[in-house]
Amino acid sequence: MFYVKTLEHEIELEPIHFGPKLKATIVRLLKEEVEGLTLANYGYVVNVIEVPEDKIRSGIIEYDTGNVCFFVKYTALLLRPFINEVLDATVSQCNKLGFFAFVGPLRVFVSKHSMPEDMFNGFDPEREAWVSDDKEVVISTGCGVRLKIKGRTVEQGNITAIGTIKDNYLGLIDDGNNENGDE
């Protein structure tokens, strides 16, 4: 799910940024450019953890523009879903085909075919929720679910996944009401 990796990125600076705080400017621009970005082989860049000053290489001048390109090595916290990984997610939308849930920035779709048999025909369009046959389990917007990743795709800088709640210990874990028993 989350892991730390050293990556490299190219930063292009205009001459207006040159001065005594050049390295701080490079670090700030690096964070603006890569945090929240999806890298095809690595996943989402959640956070730039460290940019050692000795890993900012000398710049190369582009003679036609006057800009300078710096190659920077940095350490980043990445989010990448793995197949068969079990995650806790928050349901964002329910429809007759299944429901969508988010694990941080990762969007996961759970089809009605990937739900337990007692929920297969349990979509309630009035409440926009999936209800089990015995009415014990109600999955609606805002609920917490535990799901397993069955597949993932990377498209145009976005990672999406397909999940299931059909196995043991998966399914509804929080009804989304945030009720405390001590009140």
Image (cartoon, helix red, strand yellow):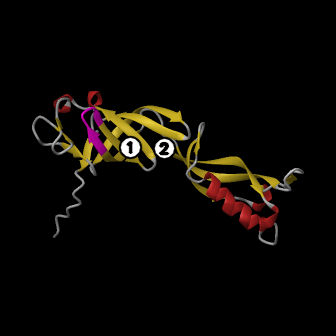
Q: Earlier in the sequence, mark 1 or mark 2?
A: 2
Q: Residue at x 22, y 51 (%)?
A: 175
Q: Residue furthest right?
A: 63
Residue 49 point in image, percent of width and height: 62, 58
Residue 126 image position (x, y, % from top left): 15, 43
Q: How far separated are the C-alphas under marks 1 and 2?
A: 9 Å
The residue sitting at the front extreme is 64
Rendering coords of residue 135 (x, y %): 11, 41
Badge 1 vs badge 2, beta-carbon distance below 8 Å: yes
Residue under the image location 72 percent in, 67 percent down: 24
Q: How many marks?
A: 2
Q: Which residue type carries mark 1?
A: Leu
The segment highlighted magenta reads: 93-98
Return the residue nearer the eye: 37 or 87: 37
Disc 1 crowd rating (10 Å Cα; few below 14, some 14-19, many 20+) is some
| Quarter of the figure that contains the C terminus | bottom left
Secondary structure beneath dot 1 equals strand
**Which residue position is annotated with label 1?**
87
Residue of label 2: 1
142 drawn magenta: no
- Can you say whether 119 is above or below 179 in the image? above
Please tell me how crowded label 2 is: few (under 14), some (14-19), or many (20+) other residues with Cα within 10 Å.
few
Task: Inspect the image, locate mark 2, and give the three-letter code of the amino acid beneath it.
Answer: Met
Residue extending farthest to the left is 134
Q: For this view, does 71 lie left or right of residue 141?
A: right
Residue 123 figure quarter: top left
Say which residue appears at 17% left-offset and 45% top-offset. 127
Q: Is residue 141 left or right of residue 15?
A: left
Q: Is residue 103 above or below residue 82?
A: below
